[in-house]
Every structure is written in structure tokens, then in C-alpha cells.
Image (spheres, coloured by chain):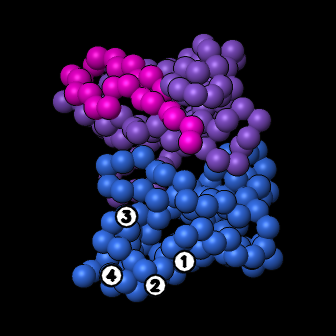
Chain colours: A purple, B blue
């Protein structure tokens, strides 16, 4: 099956710093990638849709300037959490459907962010 | 609005059968997905239904009734490793996934 990787798997940072999370599709091209956030014991919450070569589409309530998304190639999308605060501590997961095939999304392993 | 409902938690016995229900109301419908998620891990794909009926895949089966806005995931011959959260998700008219809150399944020996 298709593989999506995320880096890093976990990160601890100090309040006020920025953290970049990478999402890569390893064996297929993804014009679209999705970024989710998941708090403990809660379901996935879609943050934004990342589109290759264009601006990301953010869900209502998600701050564009705080969560910067760049999708510069067909295999890489990055999420940068700027000026992180403890409330940004969460599990961040990306997913990608194969280009031309929406029906199955492949999830990355997730990145656990802890802001101290 | 968009709404997906599934039970918060279920308990079953090893070797038994369990059915996890999901009801949905969404703007558009492009299929219903079931994912399994173990604690601290990303979801993994289990099944996809776009037509009414039952799809069987090994110990897991998924059923869909579009007219009723209803689906269920059936797990047979339960194993301890099946303890996980099971997420129901619907593809809406924009091809985004609308997620249910998940059902935590606890398997007891």
C-alpha cells in the first residue's frame, strides 16, 4: 500500500518558538494533502487542505498566520506552527489521497507536539 | 449541518462478534469509510462503502444504507489486538472527510 511519512515523530519545544512538520508521500504523487489535529480522546479535526502549487484552504477557526502550510511539490507538504503555545500541544496527522483517487486516504504516522 | 454519530465506547469479549453503528447527515455523499486507530497512532483504513449493501473483508465487514444514512462495522472472532478506536467518516460533496468522534472498543478476555 501507499506510504506517507511524517517528520518528526515527536517534538518538544519552548513556548514562543516555531516548529515545522513535514509530510511526504513516498511512493505516489499527492496534489492534495490534509492536515489534522487530534486532542486526547477526541476525533480528528481537519485543520486545512494543502494544495500543490497554490494556497492552502483553512477550516473555520484555524489561524492561517499561525499554522503555515506549504505544498511545494507533489510529494511534500509542510506545516509550521509559529509562536507555539502550550495549547498547541497535540497530535498532528497528515493524510493524502493518491492523485486521481480520492477514495482511500493514506495517513502519516503522526507528529506529537508538546509545547512547554 | 453535518453530523456523524457513533457510540462513544463499547465492550466485547474475545472471540465474540461486535457491531459498531454509525449514522450520518452530510451535505453530499461520496462514500463512507471506516478506520481503525490504536492509541497514539494514526488511523489505518479498514473499508469503504459507496453502494448499499455489505462488504466483507476477512473478519471485518461493513454495511451501508444510504436511504437511512446508516452504516455499521461488524467485527468477528474478536482478538485482543482489535482493542482500538473505530472511526466512521463520510466523504462530502467537496471530497473532504467528515469524521465521527470514534468508538473506543474494549476487548475483554
Q: Which residues are magenta?
A: A1-23
Q: Which residue is mark 4?
A: B14
Q: Earlier in the sequence, mark 3 or mark 2?
A: 2
Q: Chain of mark 2?
A: B
Work out how far the residue at label 2 is from the one at label 4, CA to CA, in angstroms. 9 Å
- Badge 3 and badge 2 in a common chain: yes
Q: Position of residue B4 (x, y in %)?
A: 60, 66
Q: Which residue is mark 1?
A: B74
Work out how far the residue at label 1 is from the one at label 3, CA to CA, in angstroms. 14 Å
Work out how far the residue at label 1 is from the one at label 4, CA to CA, in angstroms. 14 Å
Q: Residues within 10 Å of mark 4 (few under 14, many from 20)?
A: some
Q: Chain of mark 1?
A: B
Q: Position of residue B72 (x, y in %)?
A: 60, 76
Kindly indicate whether the residue at mark 3 contacts the one at mark 4 (C-beta within 8 angstroms).
no
Q: Secondary structure at mark 1?
A: strand
A66 or A70, which is in the foreground?
A: A70
Relative to A98, is B24 above or below? below
Q: Residues within 10 Å of mark 1 (few under 14, many from 20)?
A: some
Amino acid at each position: 500500500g501507499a506510504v506517507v511519512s511524517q517528520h518528526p515523530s515527536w517534538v518538544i519545544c519552548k513556548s514562543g518558538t516555531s516548529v515545522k512538520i513535514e509530510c511526504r508521500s513516498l511512493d505516489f504523487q499527492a496534489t492534495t494533502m490534509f492536515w489534522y489535529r487530534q486532542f486526547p480522546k477526541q476525533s480528528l479535526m481537519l485543520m486545512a487542505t494543502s494544495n500543490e502549487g497554490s494556497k492552502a484552504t483553512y477550516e473555520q477557526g484555524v489561524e492561517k498566520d499561525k499554522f503555515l502550510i506549504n505544498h511545494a511539490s507533489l510529494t511534500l507538504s509542510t506545516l509550521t506552527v509559529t509562536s507555539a503555545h502550550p495549547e498547541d500541544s497535540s497530535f498532528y496527522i497528515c493524510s493524502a489521497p493518491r492523485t486521481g483517487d480520492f477514495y482511500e486516504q493514506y495517513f502519516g504516522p503522526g507528529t506529537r507536539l508538546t509545547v512547554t | 449541518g453535518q453530523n456523524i454519530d457513533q457510540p462513544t465506547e463499547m465492550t466485547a469479549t474475545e472471540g465474540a462478534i461486535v457491531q459498531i453503528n454509525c449514522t450520518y447527515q452530510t451535505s453530499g455523499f461520496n462514500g463512507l469509510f471506516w478506520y481503525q486507530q490504536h492509541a497514539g497512532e494514526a488511523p489505518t483504513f479498514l473499508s469503504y462503502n459507496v453502494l448499499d449493501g455489505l462488504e466483507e473483508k476477512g473478519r471485518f465487514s461493513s454495511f451501508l444504507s444510504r436511504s437511512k444514512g446508516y452504516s455499521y462495522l461488524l467485527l468477528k472472532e474478536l482478538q485482543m489486538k482489535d482493542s482500538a478506536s473505530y472511526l466512521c467518516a463520510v466523504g462530502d460533496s467537496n471530497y473532504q472527510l467528515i469524521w465521527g468522534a470514534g468508538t473506543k472498543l474494549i476487548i475483554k478476555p
